Image (cartoon, grey):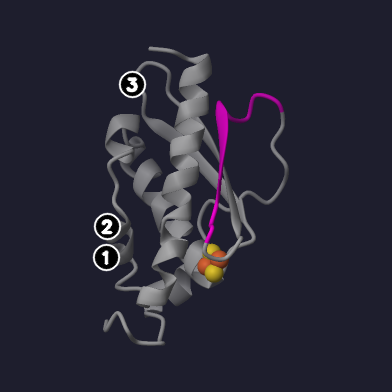
Amino acid sequence: MDKNSWTYSEEVKKNFLHPKNFLEKEPKEGDFDAQGEAGSAACGDIMKVWIKVDLKSEKVKKFKWQTWGCASAIASTSVFSEMVTERGGMEIEKALKITPQQIIERLHGLPSIKIHCSVLADQAFKDAVKNYYAVHSS
Ligand code: FES
């Protein structure tokens, strides 16, 4: 897809209309190990994420999220949540290395003006990991 296009890819539309791992209800005590948050200076939108991590393997077992962000933020976070939890979960160290480019590739492109929306999940995840290690130091 042309990054200067105004058109969203089918993958963006699919993930926006049917987002994966969206947190519908407020979590109960013990549902997750840590929470993280990020805000976009570009638009003022907020992303909140919750993670559950396997203590031994340090694999991300659950990644849930909520946002007031736009369609691009929703689609990007939906694919990020799949990337870190699929195939039994990604190790935290590896998940921290996911780049915005990898997210955008999986979305089959994103208009360049929307790139700042695609980094919110990753930034909120980093905040959650920091909070996770504050309690579960390795
Ligand atoms: Fe705010 Fe996309 S415009 S997250």
- As measured in the structure, the alpha-carbon distance from the residue carrying label 2 to the one carrying label 1 is 5 Å
* 98 to the left or right of 71: left
At 40% from the left and 52% from the top, the residue drawn is 80
Residue carrying label 2: 102
The nearer-to-camera label among 3 and 2 is 2
Instruction: Say what amino acid the circle numbered 2 marks.
Output: Gln
- As measured in the structure, the alpha-carbon distance from the residue carrying label 3 to the one carrying label 2 is 24 Å
Instruction: Examine the image and state in which quarter residue 113 appears.
Output: bottom left
Q: Secondary structure at mark 1?
A: helix
Report whether residue 18 is seen.
no
- As measured in the structure, the alpha-carbon distance from the residue carrying label 1 to the one carrying label 3 is 28 Å
Are there few (<14), some (14-19), or many (20+) residues within 10 Å of tag 1? Answer: few
Are there few (<14), some (14-19), or many (20+) residues within 10 Å of tag 2? Answer: some
| Residue 105, numbered label | 1
Rendered-image quarter of ligand 1: bottom right
Instruction: Examine the image and state in which quarter residue 85 appears.
Output: top left
Disc 2 to disc 1: CB gap under 8 Å? yes
Residue 50 pos. (x, y %): 56, 38
Is 51 situated above or below 70?
above
Residue carrying label 3: 57
At 37% from the left and 16% from the top, the residue drawn is 56
Report whether residue 69 is seen.
yes
Is 74 magenta? The answer is: no
Instruction: Say what amino acid the circle numbered 3 marks.
Output: Ser
Residue 99 pos. (x, y %): 29, 51
Instruction: Examine the image and state in which quarter residue 30 appears.
Output: top right
Q: Earlier in the sequence, mark 1 or mark 3?
A: 3
Q: In which quadrant is the C terminus drawn?
A: top left
